[in-house]
């Protein structure tokens, strides 16, 4: 198992996050990749799953991830189109991207393909308790559908969970979000790893004013 954790501790950082991943058994590299990148107004979180697995998938995923990093402050629709252009002629990827705007208190998200995304609200009085990202069919670098982002207000403690299709579906929906983001990512990977594909779990939590003083 490969586990990667990063918590932004700078005073103005809007998120804390953790990642857990595992390659398909027998493969040295995973075709699943992630990006967490500061932007001019907040932070971008993205997960990429290249079609197939092995070295070729890993190389394709790296192209997509680097494109996301390079253009992270651009509008989310343009960002996905840039990835599409960069991946033309490759095997392509599926992709889910979220952009947190610190000033507006919102999250814009956009998904192409079968990466599962769930935003779980911290306030127990909020109904519904979570929102499932509606993704669009197609592939980035292949058949890109007509894309538009969804924008959702977020509050401190709200938690975004992205899982690739190497994880059993539905685990993020019922996840208890209290505690460490890294522990949550590890638990979802351990409980949900199918063993038939690469797998990656990314958990990102909106930090509050008290967190940013630490």
Image (cartoon, helix red, strand yellow):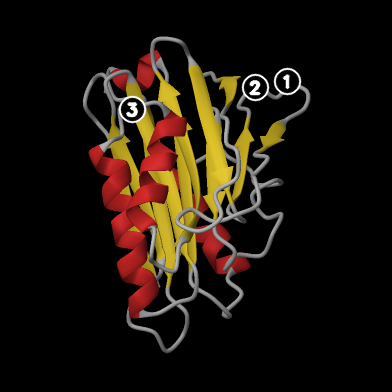
Which residue matches tag 2? 123
Q: Secondary structure at mark 3?
A: loop
Q: Is residue 122 above or below residue 176?
A: above
Q: Position of residue 76 (x, y in %)?
A: 44, 31
Q: Is residue 59 above or below residue 107?
A: below
Q: Nearer the viewer, mark 3 or mark 1?
A: 3
Q: Quadrant of residue 122?
A: top right
Q: Between 81 and 58, which is closer to the camera in this rendering?
A: 81
Kindly identify which numbered label has been placed on residue 126. 1
Sequence-wise, which precedes: disc 2 or disc 3?
3
Q: Position of residue 180 (x, y in %)?
A: 45, 44
Distance in Å between CA atoms under marks 2 and 1: 6 Å
Q: Nearer the viewer, mark 2 or mark 3?
A: 3
Sequence-wise, which precedes: disc 3 or disc 1?
3
Q: Quadrant of residue 148?
A: top right
Outermost residue, right direction? 127
Which residue matches tag 3? 74
Q: Pointers 2 and 1 in contact (CB under 8 A)? A: yes
Q: Pointers 2 and 3 in contact (CB under 8 A)? A: no
Q: Between 127 and 101, which is closer to the camera in this rendering?
A: 101
Q: Between 16 and 25, which is closer to the camera in this rendering?
A: 25
């Amino acid at each position: 198992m490969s586990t990667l954790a990063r918590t932004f501790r700078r005073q103005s950082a809007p998120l804390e996050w953790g990642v857990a991943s595992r390659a398909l058994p027998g493969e040295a590299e995973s075709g699943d990749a992630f990006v967490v990148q500061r932007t001019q107004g907040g932070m971008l979180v993205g997960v990429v799953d290249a079609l197939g697995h092995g070295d070729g998938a890993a190389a394709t995923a790296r192209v997509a991830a680097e494109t996301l990093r390079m253009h992270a402050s651009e509008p989310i629709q343009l960002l996905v189109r840039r990835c599409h252009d960069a991946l033309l002629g490759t095997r392509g990827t599926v992709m889910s991207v979220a952009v947190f705007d610190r000033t507006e208190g919102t999250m814009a998200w956009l998904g192409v393909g079968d990466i599962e995304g769930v935003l779980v609200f911290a306030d127990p009085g909020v109904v519904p308790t979570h929102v499932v990202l509606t993704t669009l069919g197609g592939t980035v670098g292949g058949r890109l559908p007509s894309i538009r982002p969804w924008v959702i207000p977020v509050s401190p403690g709200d938690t975004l969970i992205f899982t690739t299709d190497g994880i059993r579906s539905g685990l993020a929906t019922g996840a208890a979000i209290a505690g460490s983001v890294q522990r949550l990512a590890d638990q979802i990977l351990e409980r949900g790893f199918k063993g038939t594909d690469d797998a990656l779990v990314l958990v990102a939590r909106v930090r509050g004013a008290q967190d940013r003083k630490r």
